Image (cartoon, rainbow, N blue to C red):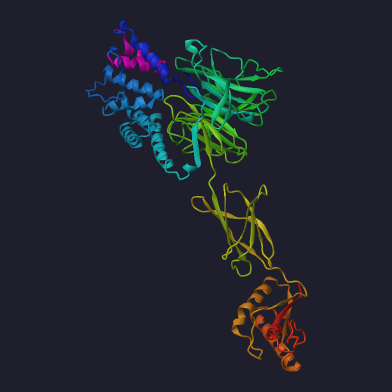
Amino acid sequence: MQRILYTGSVVKSTALTAFLALALSAGAQFSYDYLKAADNYFGKADYASSAAYYEKYLQGGKQAGDQFDPYTAKAKRKADITGGWFKATYQLAESYRLLKDYTKAAPLYGQLADTVTTQYPLLQCHYAIALRALGKYAEAEQALNHFLQEYTGQDQYASQARREAANLRYIQQQLQKKDVALYSMRPVSAGKEGASYAPVQLANNVLLFTATWPDSNAAASKKHTNRLYQAVYTGGNLTGIEKAALPANHDLHEGAATVSADGNTIYLTRWSTRDGKKNAAIYVSHKSADGNWQAPVALDTTVNKPGANSQQPYLMPNGRQLLFASDRAGGTGGYDIWIAELGAEGLPLTVANAGTAVNTPYNEQAPYFHEASATLVFASEGRTGMGGYDLFFSKATGNGWTEAQNFGYPVNSIKDDMYFTSFSKGNNILEQVVLSSDRADVCCLELFGLQKRNPLTRVSGQIIACDNHTPLAGVTVEVSDKTTGKQLYSGITDAEGRYTFTMETLQPLNGTAMLDGYVKVSQPLQTKAAEGGENVTADPVCMAKQPPVVEEVTVLNNVYYEFNKADIKPESYPALNDVVALLKSRPGIKVEIGGHTDNKGSDLLNQRLSEQRAANVVAYLVSKGIDKTRLTAKGYGASLPIAPNTNDDGTDNPEGREKNRRTEMKVLAR
């Protein structure tokens, strides 16, 4: 079975079992040179066939009803590193590793790991890769250390080993992530056995994808051929599965496609593999007036460079650029992500490399672009990750891309993860995703549905008075999304002037604060994230008191005098200090301080007492830095009562008299 991810061939376990049975069935072939045949297949990168013949050789050409069992511990034999057993065991391990069957590869490497030899210097490195893919991180690290100590070369293998060491550290860090509970991932059920990958979202939850499902109508050699399918994706399942109605070329595999927004143009990959060499090109097809697809035509050499592979196209939402992967010359190495500018007919005009922020000297494949978040997603095996291919993302900038970042665990696994499509309409690109991974399979990519909930962010803030920075309780606070205007919170501040609420994704916020006697405040909230990002604090918002109105009279409560005297009592100072703060915050205001008494005593005495009390208040304010020219002292005696001094029956009214003995402030000018 072929899949576009690798340059070699990958065979499902059922097909491999059948091949083994065929290879082991003929008793007349006991004298056959199985090692030579295995080497021949290995040289052609037909690793499924080479594995079968290495297995046969290691059993001495005997059928005996049993095949070589790589899981069973063998008695240690004295290794003849130049002999056939050592070579066949090593090459069998290599075959399984290249088939991505690490479960079988690792024990075989393990049988040879204690043998010191320069003939197979990469043994410990490849053993470490297999162990890492099986989640045996401590053993993998030990094998890598062994390799790095013994291997003296400074080449791609040393570089690969150092990357594997970095991967091991990254994996163990990722497995400690605290937000894993926000993710959910499960296989997408298609009800069929075989590889399924390269999902592309079409309209109305229709998913276009590639699968290598057995075709009962095909010839035996073509039974596992990659083809395009489409189905309705709902609830994590595929229903109504049918082959895409494209004119097929039965000699080629096809898949990894992308469709224009109007549904009338499709770009796809067609490829073949012969003797381990892949030949892939990108084709385009348009719908005819009758709604049927025309025969796909290969794009010209602008994209399909002679002698190179071009594959995995993705049409940008604007329809003017085509992303694709290619191992053409002029890149950074291996497969790179390239961008083709398209003309009016959807044909390529020019091609440019996506640059080193995306590409590495190794392989980058399967590009995808999420328009809502302006994010490029692709698979790479050239950066630190979980191992194999990992999914990375990069943000579009004015003239390129930001440095690629790993999505991390559990988006990525210790196996291969690639091909990605998001159903999200907003910034959370991981809200609903379908991707491909072989994390649950020995050999083949499968479709997985992924969802990530946004973490709840706790936002808190405080409302204070502008003049003295004291907390304000009882303030009505409303918070809204600065971009959309949608209200996110409405509440009342507590005794400490604080408010708190939670939201899924922290967005730029606007805050509004309202309290009687204070000026309404509406302004952007400046937020600061605490370590971990789950708690966010908004800078305090201060509210100013309502400015006094000309001719408005305010009673200065809590201003007290000695009995029948003009001396101010010390307990009056806090109230008078509030007047000082108000006057300093409003430097243009001029006020009159008015003294008032009840009607006990003579009018003359009451007049003098009220004048003296008003004058003493003015003196206090001046002592606190208020310009005397802004202040006027005036005594009114008992002439302006605000409550009766006596009751209707002529009896004394103490409560009324208390109200009349007062000090007032009246605004004269602003």
In front: 391, or 39?
A: 391
| Image location (x, y in percent) of residue 355 | 55, 33
Let me know if residue 385 is in the magenta part: no
Residue at 21% across, 23% down: 78
452, above or below 298, in the image:
below
**Figure quadrant of residue 587:** bottom right
In the image as oriented, which residue stretches furthest toward the top?
Answer: 28
Let me know if residue 36 is in the magenta part: yes
| Image location (x, y in percent) of residue 554 | 72, 76
Is any part of residue 514 visible from this angle? yes
Describe residue 24's horizontal placement relative to residue 625 as left or right.
Answer: left
**Figure quadrant of residue 136:** top left
Describe residue 64's horizontal placement relative to residue 570 as left or right.
Answer: left
475, above or below 118, in the image:
below
Which quadrant, please, contains the C terminus?
bottom right
From which residue to which does the magenta span run?
31-59
175, above or below 527, in the image:
above
- Judged by its main secondary structure, the magenta piece is helix
In the image as oriented, which residue stretches furthest toward the left?
Answer: 78
| Image location (x, y in percent) of residue 586 | 70, 71
In front: 210, or 181?
A: 181
Is any part of residue 45 visible from this angle? no
